[in-house]
Image (cartoon, grey):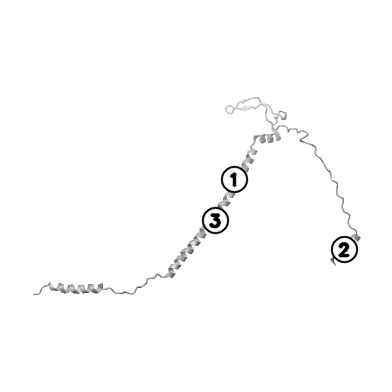
Amino acid sequence: MSSPVPQPRLRVPRIAQDAVDRARLTVVPRTRSRAPRVPFVTLVTVVLVGGIVGLLLFNTSLQQASFAAASLEQQADALAAREQTLRMELDELRNPQRVASEAQEMGMVIPTAPVFLHLGDGEVSGVRAPATPADALRLQPKAPVLPAVLAPPATVVEVPAAPEPAAPSGRDRVRRGDRANSARR
């Protein structure tokens, strides 16, 4: 009879031999795995150039915005000054004293006794009387008279005209020319 036990013994040495064969260390030549440098250098260069160009464009846009803001601020200041000037002119035109003076220059007269009209019933209270230029109120005070010390008469000084020099005669011209020619020689 044959027994199955001897077979595993035969198999064990063969499996062990395969394991030993696989377990033996051998020197393998070292392979250097180098990444190619050209693509990496190109990538770094492109990133740096792109960053510099981006910074320049960003700086330029900031400068343009700064100039635009300064221009708008100047324009706003000019408009604010113009508005202030117009408000001052409007206040001057609305001045009641000026309006009354111009009305008086046009011949209008301030009535001495006012008359009131009641809108509810249309009744007039007060005495209606026409106003005349004689009844006009003085809006502007009379100009003060200055003392003679503050308003002296004008002093007029006449300056005599300077005599004109006489024109040189023909002889003087020739003599001057001779002197100039002799000095050149």
Q: Is label 1 in a helix, a strand or a loop?
A: helix
Please identify, in this view, whether the residue under mark 2 or under mark 3 is nearer the observer. 2
Residue in the picture at 91% in, 61% down: 171
Label 3, residues with CA under 10 Å away: few <14, some 14-19, many ≥20: few
Label 1, residues with CA under 10 Å away: few <14, some 14-19, many ≥20: few
- Residue at the right extreme? 171
Instruction: Report the residue marked by disc 3.
Output: 63
Residue in the picture at 56% in, 53% down: 68
From the viewer's perspective, is residue 53 above or below residue 23?
above
The numbered dot on residue 179 is 2
Horizontal placement of 33 versus 136: left or right? left
Can you say which quadrant of the picture contains the N terminus?
bottom left
From the viewer's perspective, is residue 3 above or below residue 57?
below
The numbered mark, 2 or 1, whose residue comes first in the sequence reads 1
Name the image quarter holding residue 41.
bottom left
Name the amino acid, label 2: Arg
- Distance between the Cα atoms at labels 2 and 1? 73 Å
Name the image quarter holding residue 141.
top right
Residue in the picture at 57% in, 51% down: 70
Name the image quarter holding residue 3.
bottom left
- Between 169 and 17, the one nearer to me in the picture: 17
Horizontal placement of 34 versus 84: left or right? left
- Distance between the Cα atoms at labels 3 and 1? 25 Å
Horizontal placement of 71 versus 131: left or right? left
Instruction: Report the residue marked by disc 1.
Output: 80
Residue in the picture at 63% in, 40% down: 88
From the viewer's perspective, is residue 103 above or below residue 32?
above
The numbered mark, 2 or 3, whose residue comes first in the sequence reads 3
Name the amino acid, label 3: Gln
- Distance between the Cα atoms at labels 2 and 3? 72 Å
